[in-house]
Amino acid sequence: MYRTHTCGELTLKNQGESVRLTGWVQRVRNLGGMTFIDLRDRYGITQLAFNEEWDDSLMNEARKTGREFVIEAHGKVIERSSKNPALPTGEIEIKVSSFSVLNPSQTPPFTIEDETDGGEELRMKYRYLDIRRNPVKENLLLRSRVNLAVRQYLNQSGFIDIETPYLIKSTPEGARDFVVPSRMNEGQFYALPQSPQTFKQLLMVGGMDKYYQIVKCFRDEDLRADRQPEFTQIDCEMAFVERQDVMQTFEGMVSHLLKEFAGTESGSFPRMTYDEAMRLYGNDKPDIRFEMTFTELNTVAKNGRFKIFDEAELIVGIKAEGCANYSRKQIDALTDFVKRPQIGAGGLVWCKYNHDGSLKSSVDKFFDQEALKKWAEEFSARPGDLMLIISGSAQKSRKALSELRLHLAEELGLRDPKVFAPLWVVDFPLLEWDEESQRWHAMHHPFTSPKPEDLPLLDSEPGKVKANAYDMVLNGNEIGGGSIRIHHKELQHKMLSILGFSDEEARTQFGFLMDAFEYGAPPHGGIAFGFDRLVALIGGKESIRDFIAFPKNNAGRDLMINSPSAIDQQQLDELKLKLTI
Ligand code: ASP
């Protein structure tokens, strides 16, 4: 037996017991005639004590160990003279009677401490060392606990876990597929699933009624910061449901998780239409931890004198409460922020509501006090507030102002990761017009059902049709999205044809699904949550990388195993693949 206890469990209650511990050397401290080793494992740290008076040579052996050596120690639990109240094991130590080095360690390339000196790339290369650090370890433990809680919740609600295949056929969900060549079927390829979407729908046709899976999904996208080519979803589907049923079930699940892991009572989640979200926040995933909603000024700010406003499709602004004292420099910084190419605003108009009741703006030349007063009224501004205004095309202005809103809120400390503000966004447009391909694209995916009342518009004004879809948003992140699905062959076929599929293409790509709809497909709907992001948010972090045991970097590379990598000529030959590079 290697060990009788872990390094996290011994206390004064165990005093006098003879124990055996194993773990990694966190630190060796030599103090005159004494040596202490902090022995670490997943469960905690226990102090091993050596004393030249007890055993001189044993102490000398202990001094030869170093950071990250794996050792096994045998000894007695004794009360410590200088206690450490910060550690659960801080009242005891082990008076070591024998120990052995199970495996020595080279000096690690970065310190295995909560605050490390290792850069991101180095930590990824030696991920197994990074995982020994508390912050990463804690994240992985949290992930496991949340995973279990999700399973318990869904299990209690009658969901069953069913695995779906990873080697499938391309499904169009907006991203590029990762493909896998088939050796046995020359010239043919599997695709890795972007999600199990069609399979979960077929499980409903198969009568499974309530399905879930915590499942890997794969999308070959250009990796924006904090996206992973493979990621995990909590994927769910239910039969005989309307939108309300799905939303209720999963609001329940997320409330349960927030209560259990963040101690937050969320109450019932607010619901906002897509149009409202865009109008008030310029964003379909609004961060509602703070207000700062948009105010539109079209009716009060077009006066025939300020051309930029007169010609704008939209004049829209936010009110920064109590920020009228912002300096020139601070406002310039905000202006520079919105003018960055990624944000894309032409400029920023500001108006201060001074404490003496006067108004001062960057466009005083064109607007007198009376005009500015009207603006202030629209904003419901009070003395001390700062109004920030962007104008131009509606879409661009909203997007830029949304970025400014988040940026400013960050500066003002309004985005507290310990505060959780979930909501639903509903009534998305079913379709989006893509200028480049001159085609309609499904905003969610091609299996999403239109809202029944909008069906008549599908032929005449497809752009006006709303989807029977819903997104769950948490602190400015879309954490889940789903919809009621199409379950009639004709409608599915029509949808595909609106999306530009020929009859032939629809048949080859989705014949299996449309066939299934002809054998008694129940009405059904579902949702999928981004599990990595959900855990990261619950853990109070924005970045998902440290909640994944072995993540990839921004170039989609695993720096530890160095992949992707070339394969042997023999493998290529077997697959009948010829490289042209
Ligand atoms: N399959 C969808 C997605 O991955 C989610 C859903 O509609 O259930 O976004």
Image (cartoon, grey):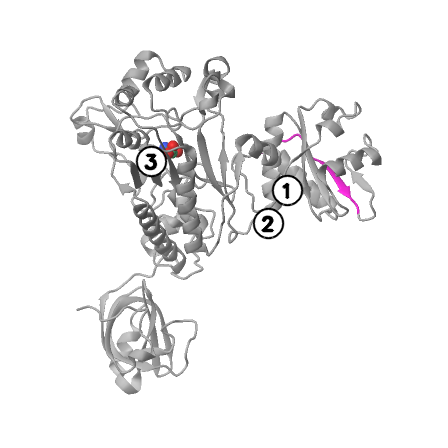
- Within 10 Å of disc 2 (Cα), the crowding (few <14, some 14-19, many 20+) is some
Query: Is tag 3's residue or tag 1's residue first in the polypeptide sequence?
Result: 3
- Within 10 Å of disc 1 (Cα), the crowding (few <14, some 14-19, many 20+) is many
Give the left or right position of residue 167, taking residue 408 as reference. Answer: left
Q: Which is in the foreground here, disc 2 or disc 1?
A: 1
Circle on res. 292 = 1
Residue at the spot of label 2? 414
**Observer-nearest of 434 and 506:** 506
SS for dot 2: loop
Report the amino acid beneath label 2. Answer: Leu
Which image quadrant: the N terminus? bottom left
What's the distance in space between the residues labelled 2 and 1, CA to CA? 10 Å
- In reply to whether residue 348 is colored magenta, the answer given is yes
Q: Position of residue 446 (x, y in %)?
A: 38, 24
In the rendered image, is residue 76 in sight? yes
Give the left or right position of residue 497, taking residue 163 as reference. Answer: right
Q: Position of residue 75 (x, y in %)?
A: 25, 78
What's the distance in space between the residues labelled 3 and 1, CA to CA? 36 Å
The range drawn in magenta is 343-354
What's the distance in space between the residues labelled 3 and 2, CA to CA? 36 Å
Circle on res. 237 = 3
Report the amino acid beneath label 1. Answer: Met
Q: Position of residue 524 (x, y in %)?
A: 34, 30
